[in-house]
Amino acid sequence: MSPDALARLHAACFTTPRPWSAAEFADLLASRFCFLLTEPGGFLLGRVIADEAELLTLAVDPAQRRQGIGARLLTRFAEASEARGATSAFLEVAEDNAAARALYGAGGWASAGRRRGYYHGPAGDAVDALILTLSLAPPAI
């Protein structure tokens, strides 16, 4: 997917946090640490630095949700992160995003903390971010 296509889908999925621009996606994709996973109707952008993976964003077309796209992307994220040497992963999710929290919970992600007022909604209201973590398989020796 091109940065423009990523930005369009991201804008269809998010108001909190704010949607990312094509330029922001292009900058992230240019990093040697970042990787993009796609499925028809969705994508996930992650990065691995040292032995830690970060799920930067996951977007699934609202018209195609609840069809397993997000779950497949999460499984692929864990596999891709492990292959890059990560032993743990983390993400931030808006506290008021119940659907995403349910998806991550079903995928084995656990609460590790909170960032108070991390996001701002379209009306400027502060929304806490929940920090979730996932243990990944240790690298094979």
Image: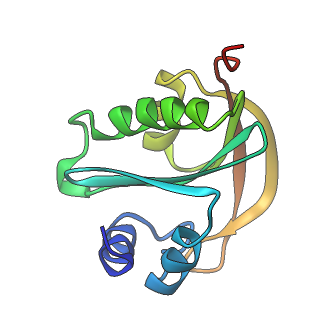
Across and down, in percent, residue 57 comes to 52, 56
Across and down, in percent, residue 29 comes to 52, 69
**Which colour scheme appears in the figure?**
rainbow
102 sits to left or right of 59: right
73 sits to left or right of 97: left
Across and down, in percent, residue 13 comes to 37, 63
Frontmost residue, 123 versus 30: 30
Q: Is residue 32 above or below residue 111?
A: below
Frontmost residue, 127 versus 74: 74
**Residue ID at (53%, 31%):** 78
Q: Is residue 58 above or below residue 85?
A: below
**Residue ID at (62%, 62%):** 32
Q: Quick one: quadrant of the N terminus?
A: bottom left
The quarter holding residue 71 reads top left
Q: Quick one: quadrant of the C terminus?
A: top right
Across and down, in percent, residue 61 comes to 26, 57
108 sits to left or right of 100: right
The quarter holding residue 33 reads bottom right
| Residue that extends furthest to the top in the rendered view of this protein | 141
Q: Is residue 44 visible?
A: yes
| Residue that extends furthest to the bottom in the rendered view of this protein | 23
